[in-house]
Structures are given as structure tokens and as C-alpha cells.
């Protein structure tokens, strides 16, 4: 795969799908974008609006479609379809409506694009990724969810500002559910190769206060945005672009995406949740086992239990 000849499909032309397509064009991540929606006029409106920017950028093509066959030969397909979250709902509240949509979508994608790498973005992303894996015939390394990549980006940005350190030197992950039971693996946090526990903390605040503040901020950030503008789409669209870029360029970057947990995490091998993986031209090239202390292991088990219960009750 090469960004110079690449094709990316986006399934769903709602807020997230349209912003993903727009970001792919603005950031020039591929040559062709297919924006699919069951309602062709919706896909056309979004695609034509994006298309008007192309003369000011590099030559690209964005194709609106309501025909799954147009997704054939895509290198990557991003799935954003489903009922959108409403004020007061959690992501897990969307499961009963979105589970069947994902099953039907994967059936069509297996038919027209069996070798494409599929990125699930629809919520609840961890459970829907598990459903996608269970209902697809493609190799499991070709399916993963956006997981806690956005949550981790939010954390690193805020922590970098607080510590006055470049973001590229902040190494810390949010893992588990993309939702209320997610948590930060503070015991594996490093700043420029120095353990966070050994790093200089600004006067007037303790490390414990920072950890408590940012755990809360990271968990509630999405809802805070939602309450103010009615949706979240810019952050996740950038996340998707980075995942696509790592695939098309075979960059082997590490992202905490939704995958079935390695047995070394001690939560079985069926639960799907956000864990760090190397993303490359084969999709999931390797899952990494992140060191964690006993308290973090308990949080991981609680998050896994919550997601497993949701899967068993709503899938």
C-alpha cells in the first residue's frame, strides 16, 4: 500500500463520517475517498462540499456512493454508521440499536472488500468491534476499533501543558473501555524517558492531584464537548487519519486500539477493549502487554467485566 495510490472508504456520512472524509482530504492521507451512505443525497452533499476544497489542495478524488461495490479494493474502510449518542446517554446505551447495524455492515464489507483493513469508530466502539470480529470472515488482524486513542491524546495534551513539556515526550496510555470505566496506566507513565514519579512537578500541585484531576478530565472530556456542541467529531477524525496513515505508510506506530486482549492481561481472550498495538500495513501487527500494578490490573478487570456484560446482554 502507498498513500500515492491508496483508497479509503468511509461508511456513514453523518457528523463523524463526513469529518473523517474531510480530514483525509485536508491532510492528504490518500488519493481516493469513497463516502458511503444508504441515503445517496446525504453522501453527495457532504462529498461535494469537501470536493470544493480540492482545487486548493493536492489532486484527490472523493466519491459519494450508496453502493457497497464502490468500496471494493479499498485499502482501509472506516465504519462510522449507527445511532448517535444523545445528551444524557452513555456510549453503551447505543449498543442495542447499533449491534445489528454493524452485523449487516460487516456482511456487506466481507462480500465486496474481504481484504480491506476495517476500523470501527461507531459507539460503543469496544463492544461493536467485538461484534464485527465475531461476524466477519476476514483475518482478525484486519479489524480493530479506534479504542482509547482519542482519550490518550486528550490526556497527553493536557499533561504536556501542565508539565510544560513537548507532547512527543509524554508517554502514557489510557486503556480499557472507551467510556466510563477507562483508566490511565500511571505506573507506566514516562516523560522523556524519566518515570513520571521522578519527574519535576510544578509548585503548587502534587503528582496525586494531577493524577486525580486528569483521570476525571479524560473520562468526562467527551461529554463536556457534547454538552456544548451536540457531538464530537474533530478529534476522532484526526485519530482516524493517523491510524490510516500508519497503515498506508507501514509506519508501525503504537496506538491503544480496540482489540481482543492478549492472555497475559489476565482477562481471558474474548474481551475487546483499548490496548496498545503496533499498527502497520497488516493492520494489527502486534499487541503489546503494558506493565501495570495491582490496582491498575483490578481496574482493567472491572472494565473488561463491564464490557463483557454489555456484549452478552446486547449482542
Image (cartoon, helix red, strand yellow):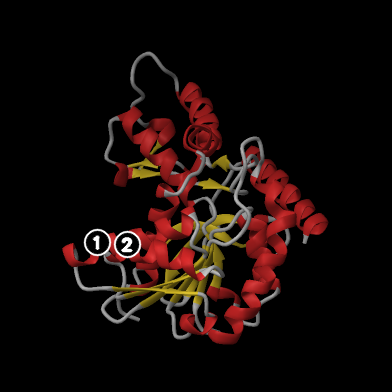
Identified at 36% across, 38% down, the residue is 157
As measured in the structure, the alpha-carbon distance from the residue carrying label 1 to the one carrying label 2 is 6 Å
* Nearest the eye: 272 or 20: 20
Residue 42 in sight = yes
x then y, percent, for residue 241: 37, 61
> Above or below — where is 269 with respect to 153?
below
Residue at label 1?
53
Residue at label 2?
50
* Nearest the eye: 253 or 266: 253
**Quarter of the image where the N terminus is located:** bottom left
Q: Quadrant of residue 8?
A: bottom left
x then y, percent, for residue 252: 38, 68
Identified at 39% across, 31% down, the residue is 198
Residue 261 in sight = no
> Above or below — where is 16 with respect to 101?
above
x then y, percent, for residue 267: 71, 55
Residue at the farthest right position? 313
Task: Please tell me how crowded label 2 is: few (under 14), some (14-19), or many (20+) other residues with Cα within 10 Å.
Answer: some
Amino acid at each position: 500500500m502507498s498513500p500515492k495510490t491508496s483508497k479509503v472508504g468511509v461508511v456513514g456520512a453523518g457528523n463523524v463520517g463526513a469529518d473523517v472524509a474531510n480530514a483525509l482530504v485536508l491532510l492528504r492521507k490518500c488519493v481516493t475517498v469513497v463516502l458511503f451512505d444508504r441515503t445517496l443525497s446525504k453522501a453527495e452533499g457532504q462529498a461535494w462540499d469537501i470536493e470544493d476544497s480540492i482545487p486548493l489542495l493536492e489532486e484527490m478524488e472523493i466519491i459519494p456512493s450508496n453502493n457497497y461495490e464502490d468500496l471494493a479494493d479499498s485499502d482501509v474502510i472506516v465504519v462510522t454508521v449507527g445511532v448517535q449518542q444523545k445528551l444524557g446517554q452513555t456510549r453503551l446505551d447505543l449498543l442495542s440499536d447499533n449491534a445489528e447495524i454493524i452485523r449487516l455492515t460487516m456482511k456487506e464489507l466481507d462480500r465486496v472488500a474481504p481484504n480491506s483493513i476495517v476500523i470501527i469508530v461507531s459507539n460503543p466502539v469496544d463492544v461493536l468491534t467485538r461484534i464485527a470480529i465475531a461476524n466477519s470472515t476476514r483475518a482478525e488482524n484486519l479489524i480493530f476499533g479506534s479504542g482509547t486513542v482519542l482519550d490518550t491524546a486528550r490526556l497527553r495534551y493536557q499533561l504536556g501543558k501542565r508539565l510544560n513539556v513537548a507532547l512527543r515526550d509524554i508517554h502514557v496510555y489510557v486503556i480499557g473501555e472507551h467510556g466510563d470505566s477507562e483508566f490511565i496506566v500511571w505506573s507506566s507513565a514516562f516523560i522523556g524517558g524519566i518515570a513520571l514519579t521522578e519527574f519535576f512537578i510544578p509548585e503548587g500541585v502534587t503528582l496525586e492531584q494531577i493524577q486525580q484531576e486528569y483521570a476525571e478530565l479524560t473520562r468526562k472530556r467527551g461529554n463536556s464537548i457534547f454538552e456544548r456542541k451536540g457531538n464530537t467529531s474533530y478529534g476522532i477524525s484526526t485519530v482516524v487519519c493517523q491510524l490510516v496513515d500508519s497503515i498506508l505508510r507501514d509506519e508501525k506506530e503504537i496506538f491503544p486500539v480496540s482489540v481482543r486482549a492478549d492472555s497475559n492481561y489476565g482477562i481471558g481472550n474474548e474481551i475487546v477493549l483499548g490496548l496498545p498495538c503496533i499498527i502497520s500495513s497488516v493492520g494489527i501487527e502486534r499487541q503489546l502487554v503494558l506493565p501495570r500494578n495491582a490496582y491498575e490490573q483490578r481496574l482493567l478487570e472491572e472494565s473488561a467485566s463491564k464490557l463483557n456484560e454489555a456484549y452478552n446482554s446486547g449482542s
